[in-house]
Image: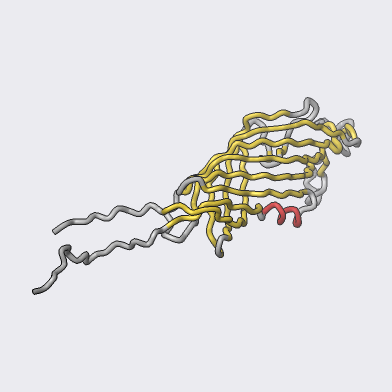
Amino acid sequence: MGVAQSKPIDLQPRDTVAKSDPYGLRVGIDLSRPVLSFLKDDYTGLEIVGDYRLTKKLYLAAEIGNEKKSQIQELGNNLNLNLMPGEGIEELYSFTTSGSYIKLGVDYNTYQNWYGMFNSIYIGGRYAVSSFSQTLTNYSFFNSNRDFNPDGFVLGSNEAEEFTGLNASWLEFVVGLKAELFANIYLGASVRIGYLVSDKSSDRFPNLWIPGFNKVTDGSNFGVGYNYSITYFIPLYKKAKDLAPVDQKEE
């Protein structure tokens, strides 16, 4: 007598090891602002970036920063072709903008990672607000008639005038990527197109540059920005990874 198996042998067994994805917080800084602060005397800035993974593809995202920038508006005051480059340039006004901003929104990862990879190519959106002040350092009156002042513009004031309580808000469309360089360390880059929703300025001087938004263009509500970030991922918990169903046929 003999004893045989009551069930057929499975020649294609499935992997029964549970697979999971880590979920948590990724925080870091924008690298471009410290670099610009070091290279340029007229700019200082710092931005902290972060995101939190909600689902397989969706992330909550935020940026918080502070910027200070000084600018000079110059105009040519002489059409003499015999002048050397740089000559005949007159300073019309100079100002300094300083303030903070915060951006909140979501990112959606469009990249399909292999198991164990967590890179992303994403699109997203932000709602941003900025609070700042401007100091008009000096200004002159522009006059195209050079009969009375052939050597320069008429001086308006050399006394600094500060305008406080200024603010702005805008919407941002974001396209970017994040790639894992080492374990839990990511290098990222993004391009941002902003649309100015509100802009509270002084009656005496318009907002020509907004922290977090960059240059304000006359006659347009659009602005462009970018960042280059390095972040560290802090895993908080894991979720089971959804596996693709396998068709099984009984013979």
In the picture, the quarter occupied by the N terminus is bottom left
Give me the residue at 78% from left, 43% from top.
Answer: 71
On the picture, is 216 further left or further right than 121?
right
Label tally: 0
Residue closest to the eye, 166 or 86: 166
Residue farthest front in this picture: 1
Q: Quadrant of residue 7?
A: bottom left
Q: Position of residue 101 (x, y in %)?
A: 69, 40
Residue farthest bottom in this picture: 1
Vertical comparison of 72 with 184: above or below: above
Residue closest to the eye, 98 or 47: 47
Residue closest to the eye, 47 or 217: 47
Q: Position of residue 204 (x, y in %)?
A: 80, 27
Give me the residue at 41% from left, 54% from top.
Answer: 241
Residue farthest left in this picture: 1
Give me the residue at 70% from left, 45% from top.
Answer: 65
Vertical comparison of 237 with 153: above or below: below
Give me the residue at 61% from left, 44% from top.
Answer: 62
For residue 75, say whether it is visible: no
Residue closest to the eye, 152 or 197: 197
On the picture, is 111 further left or further right than 78?
left
Vertical comparison of 83 with 6: above or below: above
Q: Position of residue 251 (x, y in %)?
A: 13, 59
Type of colouring: secondary structure
On the picture, is 63 further left or further right than 70?
left
For residue 103, say whether it is visible: yes
